[in-house]
Image: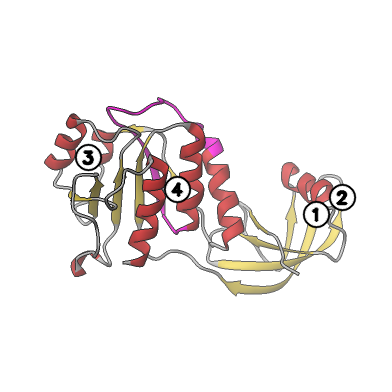
């Protein structure tokens, strides 16, 4: 039987006590766990820890570790810089980017951004749930909303940064020198980048590519770019 994975913010030893009220409630009321049932816990250190439920109270659960195994943590640093779009679409992009191994997600304000704010707490919850589901051993970082100019100024000189735009040549192969470098992927909003956005990114010497010959929705472009760089 497939065991459910849960992300926790605490050290994981041979014995662990879970006193997170919401997690304990989920285990007892949703999953209806009992003494002797098993769960997998991870905290981002690269290990999956299998535990059996040993003691249960109204406010806490004591677990005993039965096995520890290495889990997958992405090795290449890939940042998705996605223009702020409609809430549901941005949340979908965060979920899929997490599954595809993106290490950090940066919501950016560009000239045609449709909305000016997102719930960082909600996005982090979606990223955690996606990591739990897909077997990933860590959680991507999600930054507060920043401007495109701020995102560009924070780029490291050692990062291979790509602006995706409809009118450019398709990305078919990363240069050999870029294949082990940190990557930053810039995806525009619905309606595409504004002229001022393009000028800023050209001034920052971003590499320019497209994702093919059709017009993609912003969330589709983000997911496609994340999948593509994992395959190149």
Asked whether the residues under the numbered discs 1 and 2 touch, taking CB atoms below 8 Å apart as contact, a structural biologist would say: yes
Distance between the alpha carbons at the discs numbered 3 and 4: 18 Å
Q: Residue 118: where, in percent of width, then height?
A: 47, 31
Q: At x 14% / y 35%, what residue is drawn?
A: 199
Distance between the alpha carbons at the discs numbered 1 and 2: 6 Å
User: Which residue is disc 1 drawn over?
Assistant: 61
Q: Earlier in the sequence, mark 2 or mark 3?
A: 2
Q: Residue 193: where, in percent of width, then height?
A: 25, 35
Q: Is residue 7 left or right of residue 149?
A: right
Tell me the crowding category of disc 3: few under 14, some 14 to 19, or many 20 or more residues within 10 angstroms, Cα based: few
Distance between the alpha carbons at the discs numbered 2 and 3: 51 Å
Question: Of helix, strand and loop, which one carries label 2?
Answer: loop
User: Which residue is disc 2 drawn over?
Assistant: 57
Q: Residue 200: where, in percent of width, then height?
A: 17, 36
Q: Give the range drawn in magenta.
A: 100-122
Instruction: Determine the image quadrant of residue 216.
Output: top left
Q: At x 26% / y 62%, what residue is drawn?
A: 181
User: Which residue is disc 3 drawn over?
Assistant: 153
């Amino acid at each position: 039987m497939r065991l459910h994975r849960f992300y926790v913010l605490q050290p994981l030893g041979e014995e662990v006590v879970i006193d997170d009220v919401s997690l304990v409630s989920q285990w007892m009321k949703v999953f209806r766990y009992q003494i002797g049932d098993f769960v997998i816990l991870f905290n981002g250190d690269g290990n999956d820890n299998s535990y059996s439920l040993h003691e249960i109270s109204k406010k806490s659960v004591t677990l005993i570790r039965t096995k520890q195994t290495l889990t997958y943590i992405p090795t290449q640093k890939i940042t998705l810089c996605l223009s702020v779009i409609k809430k549901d679409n941005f949340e979908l992009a965060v979920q899929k980017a997490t599954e595809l191994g993106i290490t950090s997600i940066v919501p950016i304000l560009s000239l045609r951004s449709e909305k000016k704010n997102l719930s960082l707490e909600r996005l982090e919850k979606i990223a955690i749930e996606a990591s739990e589901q897909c077997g990933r051993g860590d959680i991507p970082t999600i930054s507060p909303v920043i401007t495109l100019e701020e995102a560009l100024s924070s780029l490291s000189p050692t990062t291979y940064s790509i602006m995706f735009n409809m009118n450019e040549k398709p990305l078919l192969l990363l240069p050999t020198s870029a294949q082990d470098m940190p990557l930053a992927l810039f995806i525009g909003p619905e309606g595409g980048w504004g002229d001022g956005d393009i000028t800023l990114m050209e001034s920052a010497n971003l590499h320019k590519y497209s994702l093919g010959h059709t017009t993609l929705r912003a969330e589709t472009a983000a997911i496609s770019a994340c999948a593509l760089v994992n395959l190149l």
